[in-house]
Image (tube, grey):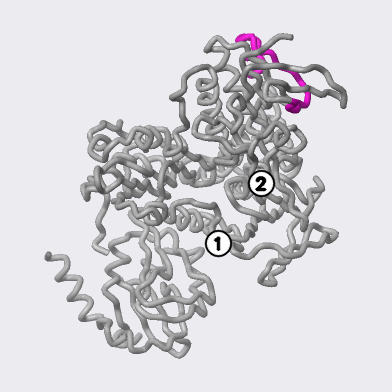
Amino acid sequence: MAEDALKISQDHVWVRLDEEGARLGISDFAAEALGKIIYVDLPEIGAEVKRGEPFAAVESGKAQVELSSPITGKVIKVNERLAEEPDLINQDCLGKGWIALLTTADTSALKGLMSKAEYDLFVAEAAEE
Amino acid sequence: MFLYDIVILGAGPGGYVAAIRAAQLGAKVCIIEKEFVGGTCLNWGCIPTKAMYRSATLFAEMRKAETFGLSCKEPSAHLDRIVARNNQIVKDLREGVEQLFRRHRINLISGMGSVKQPGEVEVLSGGRTKETVRGRNLIIATGSEPMALGLLPWDGERVFSTRSILQLETIPKSLFIVGGGVSGCEFALVFGALGSEIYIAKRSTDPIKALDRDLTRELVRAFKKRRFRLHLGDPPVAAVHTGRGVEVTLQSGTKVETEMVLVTVGRVPVSSGLGFPEIGLHLEQGFIQVNGHCQTNVPTVYAIGDVTGKHLLAHYASHQGLVAVEHALGNKTAVVAEHAVPAAIFTSPEIATVGLTSQECEQRGTAYREGAFPFRALGKAQAIGEIEGFVKVIAARENDRIIGMHIIGPDATTLLAECTLAVNRGVTLHELSRTIHAHPTLAEAVWEAAEDATGRSIHKLPLGL
């Protein structure tokens, strides 16, 4: 998959534009920090999401985390598989473990996000502080 | 004509507690009850619902037995037997209250009391006057009853009230709950755990009014996890009985058909036709208005419990009962502790709340700081496999006194007592953090939440997210 099309926010949420819309999920760093995901609180289809506001939540044995949306848009599809297999996120967070699909006109938001390489550096630097 | 010191109208948790305290203080007491002692709480509320809650949550635990290394093949629930157990417990407790009355020489009169004058109550039985009772002080504790919904009248076959649903014999395949609130949410939990498909619809977008916003978010999430279908902010506008059940149409146009419906849209005071306005009592929408000593505008007449409409809670009624009696018998400083009224809600996870919410602090312009601690960061919670939820503490910024505590999680309703004591006495964050909390207990989460309010929680895990 085209990892260079992937953009990631400082809140550890990735966006990828594909033929269906803007797909969102959580980063590998976040999935690893959380440990085995036991529940995903998916958004409602049709929900209006604003950039910077919570759109979903993930829960592991260690923590419950609200996920902040990197873009403004409307939810048109959610990953139903996560209802029975929430740990799909741990298995393949950048692919099969996607969380929600949005339609969006907010493509300018993507400019403010990091590439995978920039994100990996951001995470490494934060760990050193 | 014999003159009692205190005459009490209604033997619910307000009335009967007031009667016993009055007798303890040496008063001659008469209590009048039209139905059963114990009122709504004992007979059709707190007690039977909690007995049922125990059966339901135990059933849910049995189905998770494998997680704990246990085997429990194909457990089943039998509502008729659950209800029989509830009914026996209610009967035993009722007899217990009657025994307490005899022990304290409280005169219990069965019948419908109505007030003729501030010091005089006429008791009717079978439509005729049984006797007239006179007292120096009167305490009105007539309570409340379920509010009817014209759209869906109770029929005891498909459409139930919180009272009639307690005598159901079979678990419905699906249950539509109209109105949320505490009752609606608690019944959702019980029948959901017993295997019914649950739908909840109500006018407002909050499942339970006035709950701290963090608790509301967590409760909605807990309901979604348990696959309850929520239609918050989407009340029913039409209903039709089909052959198989009831089809309800919501404001949005969504139609839902379920086997049974529970209508729990609120409660109305029991105050009409009992002589209250005639003796000069001030009522608003049927609720009797009282001051901080539970006195009405007629100095020798007090009112307590649901009929005053302040908090529809049994323990609040009992507390008002103690205050009213002490005030009537001479302690003019007896006053209701309005700032520290706890509420315990038996959802799963349980909810407990006392004092101000974050929203209330903001509305009042009270500068505050908050701390929160998730149960999953506590060893005990992991050990018992109950990791949902958190404890939240709110303290006034000017002096660090705890003004609100809110819990959603395992045993929240028991942890509430420490929280109520803290809010009641204005305990500071420092005082709570210097109180040793035994390990390993869930109460450590309360201590940790207080520590978190000053940024010093020991076990809260920063994930760097």
- Examine the structure image and report whether residue B163 is included in the region drawn in magenta: no
Determine the residue positioned at 27% across, 68% down.
A29
- Examine the structure image and report whether residue B112 is included in the region drawn in magenta: yes
Say left or right for B291 vs A73: right
**Which amino acid type is marked by label 1?**
Thr
Q: Is residue B33 above or below residue A3?
A: above
Q: Is residue A124 visible?
A: yes
- Near mark 1 (Cα within 10 A), the count class, few <14, some 14-19 or many ≥20, is some
The outermost residue toward the left is A128
**Tag 1 subunit:** B
Q: Is residue B60 above or below residue B426?
A: below
Of marks 2 and 1, which one's residue comes earlier in the chain? 1
Q: Is residue B100 visible?
A: no
The spot of residue A63 in percent (x, y) is 34, 56
Per the rendered image, the range of residues in magenta is B96-116
Q: Which residue is mark 2?
A: B285
The spot of residue B417 in percent (x, y) is 42, 33
Q: Which residue is mark 1?
A: B205
**Which amino acid type is marked by label 2?**
Gln
Q: Quadrant of residue B287?
A: top right
